[in-house]
């Protein structure tokens, strides 16, 4: 695998391969078995948006693989002053062995890969969040034993998380149902992909989407960069909260995932969040293991 730009670029088999390696690396981490697959290698990390989990899990992860991280933010670098991405790509490629980038436009990530000569890993764009969804699939498989045939339901905004969950879920053989209000649906590219698969459902009814689901997932209503739309979004997503009444529609043993940060009382109820904390924080931990697998597959 050369890059991880979006899950649309991977086959279902490639996704499962990453998850298998992630499981193995998690086992080794838990048992104190060293795995220096990227000894001496440098990972450049570019952050044009805030981060807690992605920042820490990538930096700890590259260290556990025997490498090290160099972190750039837009404000502290020439990126924030408008240096073209094609120049940043060619410069960084001469210093580091791989680049993780979190930014707004998917095009910028694709351009970084096109103009640079080292692997590029997408750490979130407005379009997708592939690393997060690999960790989600890893977590679901860990608790449910398998992925194929399970029903994954996402309630909320047609955003980066919904996009990647639709693609990742369908590629590994899950049924995927999503509920979002009119005007907040996933982009055409994602709906076109989904329409080629059986087992995809798009509705504006959270109850319909959650019916008999094995996994119920949500994310914030206002993503990074959309802060000015907060009030409008709060109104549009009224009724899209994962609360106890909605969870009663899902299977009795359904698990909840949330990529975090969560807004209790908005997209998720307090008792549903705390009742599913063991799944949600395992999901957060699995970012570390899944991303180590991605780094080994791309930079190894
Ligand atoms: N879920 C996630 O990507 O978290 P951060 O924004 O903290 O990196
Ligand atoms: N959809 C959210 C995810 C944060 C991890 C955002 O883009 O802000």
Image (tube, rainbow, N blue to C red):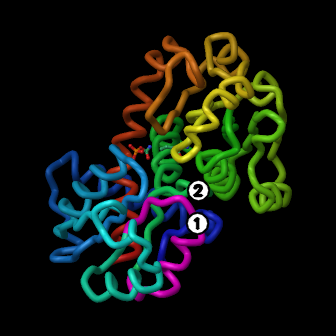
Q: Quadrant of residue 116?
A: bottom left
Q: Which mark is residue 274?
A: none
Q: Residue at x 74, y 49 (%)?
A: 186
Per the image, label 1 sits on a secondary structure element best described as helix
- Judged from the image, the quadrant occupied by ligand 1 is top left
Per the image, label 2 sits on a secondary structure element best described as loop
Considering only vertical position in the picture, is 92 above or below 251? below
Judged left or right of residue 35, residue 149 is right
The 10 Å Cα crowd at callout 2, few under 14, some 14 to 19, many 20 or more, is many
- Lower position in the chain sequence, tag 1 or tag 2: 1
Residues marked 1 and 2 touching at CB (< 8 Å): yes
**Total of numbered circles in the picture?**
2
Q: Position of residue 179 (x, y in %)?
A: 76, 34
Q: Residue at x 22, y 45 (%)?
A: 30
Q: Residue at x 70, y 37 (%)?
A: 151
Foreground of the two, 276 or 157: 157
Foreground of the two, 220 or 175: 220
Q: Position of residue 197 (x, y in %)?
A: 81, 56
Task: Locate the C terminus and report the quarter of the image it occupies.
Answer: bottom left
Q: Residue at x 73, y 43 (%)?
A: 176
Q: Position of residue 9 (x, y in %)?
A: 62, 71
Foreground of the two, 89 or 268: 89
Q: Which mark is residue 128?
A: 2
Judged left or right of residue 178, residue 26 is left
Q: Is residue 172 visible?
A: yes
Q: Quadrant of residue 95?
A: bottom left
Residue occupied by mark 1: 106
Give the magenta part as a residue range.
100-118
């Amino acid at each position: 695998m050369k890059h991880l730009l979006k899950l649309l670029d991977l086959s279902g088999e490639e996704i499962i391969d990453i998850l298998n390696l992630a499981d193995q690396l998690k086992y080794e981490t838990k048992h104190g078995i060293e795995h220096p697959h990227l000894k001496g290698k440098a990972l450049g990390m570019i952050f044009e948006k805030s981060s807690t989990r992605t920042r820490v899990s990538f930096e700890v992860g590259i260290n556990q693989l025997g490498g090290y991280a160099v972190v750039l933010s837009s404000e502290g670098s020439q990126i924030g002053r408008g240096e073209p991405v094609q120049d940043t790509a060619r410069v960084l490629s001469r210093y580091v062995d791989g680049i993780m980038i979190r930014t707004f436009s998917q095009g910028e990530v694709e351009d970084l890969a096109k103009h640079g000569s080292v692997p590029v890993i997408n750490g979130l764009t407005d379009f997708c969040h592939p690393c997060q969804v690999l960790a989600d699939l890893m977590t679901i498989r860990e608790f449910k034993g398998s992925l194929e045939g399970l029903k994954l339901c996402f309630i909320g905004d047609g955003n980066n998380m919904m996009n990647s969950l639709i693609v990742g879920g369908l590629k590994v053989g899950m049924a995927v149902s999503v509920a979002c209000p009119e005007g907040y649906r996933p982009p055409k590219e994602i709906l076109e992909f989904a329409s080629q698969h059986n087992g995809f459902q798009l509705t504006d009814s959270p109850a319909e989407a959650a019916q008999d689901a094995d996994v119920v997932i949500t994310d914030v209503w206002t993503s990074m960069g959309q802060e000015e739309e907060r009030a409008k979004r709060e109104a549009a997503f009224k009724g899209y909260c994962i609360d106890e009444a909605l969870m009663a529609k899902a299977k009795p043993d359904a698990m909840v995932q949330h990529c975090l940060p969560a807004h209790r009382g908005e997209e998720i109820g307090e008792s549903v969040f705390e009742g599913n904390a063991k799944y949600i924080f395992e999901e957060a931990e699995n970012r570390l293991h899944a991303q180590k697998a991605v780094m080994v597959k791309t930079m190894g």
